[in-house]
Amino acid sequence: MTIAIGADHAGFVLKEQLREVLEAAGHKVTDRGTHSGDACDYPDFAFLVADEVASGRAERGILVCSTGAGMCIAANKVPGIRAAVGVSADQVRLTRAHNDLNLLTLGARYLDFAEARHLVETFLSTSFDQGRHSRRLEKIAARERNGSGTLEEKSQ
């Protein structure tokens, strides 16, 4: 699997650890930075990774910052991205299965390496359930395309 990965200065160390694990597992990893612990702006890296995923050049993306929230907010501004902050394996599994999560964000301040690795492994090994979930994602995609996406009213 091709995975784009990125972080800001707060997530740099954890990103490096995860990159090594992903490469050792045989994944092709596109590291979009940062490449040091020097202060930088998280949106720059969030957009680079999100663009890789949205374009199809990467199948999945992983972003790391202090809380995971800033990266998540920025990445979700890119059409086609479905990012969420990973907080537990069950939450990541359900978000992947029900929402076709294609970009996982992690908070380096709140996760140690073992926890983050487990969340990433769950993210990569869980498949999308499709079915009724596909209809819901199509509504989101319609909103991204043309501002529509309202609920269809059903007469009862």
Image (spheres, grey):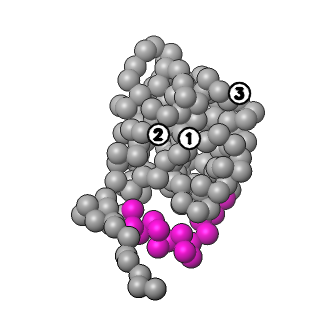
**Which residue appears at 46% of the width and 53% of the height?**
82
Q: Residues within 10 Å of mark 2 (few under 14, many from 20)?
A: many
Counting from the top left corner in percent of width and height, residue 73 is at 42, 39
**Which residue appears at 45% of the width and 65% of the height?**
137
Check the image and report above or below for 84 versus 63.
below
- Identify the residue under disc 1: 85
Q: Quadrant of residue 50?
A: top left
Q: Quadrant of residue 17?
A: top right
Contact check, label 1 and label 2, Cβ < 8 Å? yes
Residue 16 appears in the rendering: no
Q: Which residues are magenta?
A: 126-140
Mark 1 or 3: in front is 1
Element type at mark 3: loop
**Furthest residue in direction right, as rendered:** 114
Check the image and report above or below for 152 versus 141.
below
Helix, strand or loop: magenta stretch: helix
- Identify the residue under disc 3: 112
- Amino acid type, label 2: Cys
Q: Nearer the viewer, residue 56 or 144?
A: 144
Q: Residues within 10 Å of mark 1 (few under 14, many from 20)?
A: many
Whole-number angstrom distance, CA of label 2 to CA of label 3: 19 Å
Counting from the top left corner in percent of width and height, residue 15 is at 58, 30
Element type at mark 1: strand
- Identify the residue under disc 2: 72
Check the image and report above or below for 53 versus 40.
below
Residue 88 appears in the rendering: yes
Which sits earlier in the primary sequence, circle 1 or circle 2? 2
**Furthest residue in direction left, as rendered:** 146
Check the image and report above or below for 152 versus 31.
below
| Image quadrant occupied by the N terminus | bottom right
